[in-house]
Amino acid sequence: MTNYAVVNPRSLPKSYSVTSTRSDNSEDFRDLVRAASARSMGENFELNLLIQQQIRQQMPSRKVPRSVSVGMGRIDEDKPYVLADQEDVSMMLMKNDLKYPRSRSHAVSKTSNVHGPQKLQGIQHLGPKSQRTLHGQLVTQSTSAYGIAMNEFMLVEASYWIGMAHVVVQIRPLQAAATGSIVEFLPGFEGPLPFHLHTGYVGVGKEEEKQLFYYFIKSESEPEKDPLIVWLTGGPGCSSFNGVVYEIGPLYYKQKEYNGSLPTLGLTPNSWTKVANIIFLEQPVNTGFSYATTPEAINVIDVDACKHVYEFLLKWLVDHPEFSSNSFYLGGDSYSGIILPRVVQLISDGIEAGNKPLINLKGYLLGNPLTFPEEKNFVMPFLLGMGIVPNDLYQSLVQNCKGEYREDFAPTNAQCTQDLEIVDELLWYINDQHVLDPLCGSETESPRPFPSAFRGRKRRSLEENSISPNCYGSLVDRHELSNKWANDPRVQKALHVRKGTVDHWARCRQKGIKKTYTFTFMDSISYHVNHSSKGYRSLIYSGDHDMGVPFQSTEAWIKSLNYSIVDNWRQWTVNGQVAGYTRSYSNKMTFATVKGAGHVAPEYKREECFNMFKRWISHDPL
């Protein structure tokens, strides 16, 4: 037997109305659930009903079904929505003595398996047509059914009596699906958005105590056919809004000297969402608008952060089954080079285990990816190539330091120590994100996997030595616009950010994340080995002026995979100009440099990176 719940969200301005009907003709249960409403702060919710009877005596006058399910699903604010049948046990029908008339209702929080009147002590009586507040949420009583209360973080139950049965109904935030709201206008952008954007939260963790915020932008081409990508910005602790407005998304800040007004947004023609559906995920918790519901939940270990991304994806696809068959790719940059390959492994393992929903995993892409600790040793040949370190000093470093230049390396001889101190002096005020750019603002304003790109024992920061005579128009200057924009209450309202969950939005929250994020692994090469053996496609690209994660180190670990070359080192071009160099391997991996780009490449060369991505995602050569 199948039942459906029909939702008409427009019946109440700020509430959702749910009506349930049965598919058979049993009049006794026709009015079991007649109507209910619950204010949910814009959230979706689930109403799962499973009725079970415990018979002490025959009830010949009643046709009582063994079970009835009224399912769950996403509530669409634009039209009535039919929810599919589910099996989750949320309602119990038990035979008891008739103690209350059926028109009465009760609500109780954090209670389950209420079996009779002896368990109903202290329960708040709502009464017909009444509205009471329970845990800060609106509780509405229907005249013909029962009162329902919903708290954002707590399970809330309503109990009532039908005939000789006591019924407990549970309503809780939808665990199997995401909550999302369409964004049609954004402060600072003139007119309606010319693309589909919705934002929302997905709860992850044992008690969904970590609420991960996301931006979802549909492809502007054929969203029902184009690939689906989950994008992870690096850091850790950097908002995925970086991807939306600075890297691969459809928006950008119009450059003008900040005068205290709201920064304005423009539309870029080089958005990856022209050809792909992209979810920009704020992770780990305490990043961007993602938040924790308990003080303890703010802490996260890197291996758990990977699991949370996978959990997010499964739940999001439950709520958006129309994308479950699309080709799926995971993408990211910088520190994501460590965790993203592990997430791909979790997805791959889940596919083999038959986890639902099945994910149509095709591959992954990484930009300027941190991959293994020893890649810091490749900074020295990078500095030689950039003309920052002279050849004689480089040769002395190679001879005396034996190729070890990492921060945790203790020099074994005095000459190595002396050479490294000279390099430190040479790197004062060099921008490790892009060695040709001026060093503007605090070093902590941009994502860095380590405190500095090299050793940094004497590295000065601009917090101590301001040398920025004119950084107007620099990347740091543009980054500051996002802090002004995203902290505006009008913006947060438009994005459907839950009020009071984030005190202050930060583009990169790296200082705070160091206190709550635990690193347990910093090498992802073995995962690339596994993915290669399974035939997944991959695109690895690097800005060739990035000192933090030099392209030489990326080239080295790719070479260590020991796959044969199928397309040797060559130029790739955009508009007739050299955009970089590329090489492809037999494991379906493509490596590309982006000429003139830094950390990360799309921030500096948006048009070139879009063309690179569009060709690769279409299975065309770069």
Image (tube, helix red, strand yellow):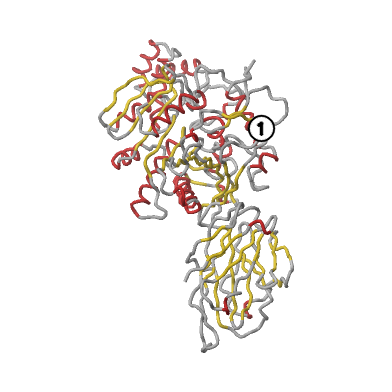
Identify which amino acid the numbered label 1 is placed on: Glu
Please name the residue shown 52% across and 18% down the image. 430
Label 1, secondary structure: give it: loop
The reply, left or right, for residue 245 in relation to residue 345 is: right
User: Height in image: 598 above or below 119?
Assistant: above
Camera-nearest residue between 123 and 520:
123
Question: Residue 598, percent across and down?
Answer: 48, 23
Mark 1 Cα within 10 Å, few/some/many (few <14, many 20+)?
Answer: few
Question: Residue 498, percent across and down?
Answer: 64, 48
User: Height in image: 21 above or below 579?
Assistant: below
Question: Residue 504, percent across and down?
Answer: 66, 39
The reply, left or right, for residue 412 in relation to residue 505 is: left
Please name the residue shown 69% across and 37% down the image. 488
Please name the residue shown 42% across and 54% down the image. 357
Camera-nearest residue between 467 and 447:
447
Q: Does residue 340 appear in the picture of this structure?
A: yes
Total numbered labels placed on residues in the image: 1
Question: Residue 596, percent across and down?
Answer: 46, 19
Q: Would you name the residue on which mark 1 appears?
A: 190
Camera-nearest residue between 544 and 610:
610
Q: Quadrant of the C terminus?
A: top left
Q: Does residue 339 appear in the picture of this structure?
A: no
In the displayed orientation, state which residue is furthest to the front: 25
Within the image, what quadrant is residue 183 found in? top right
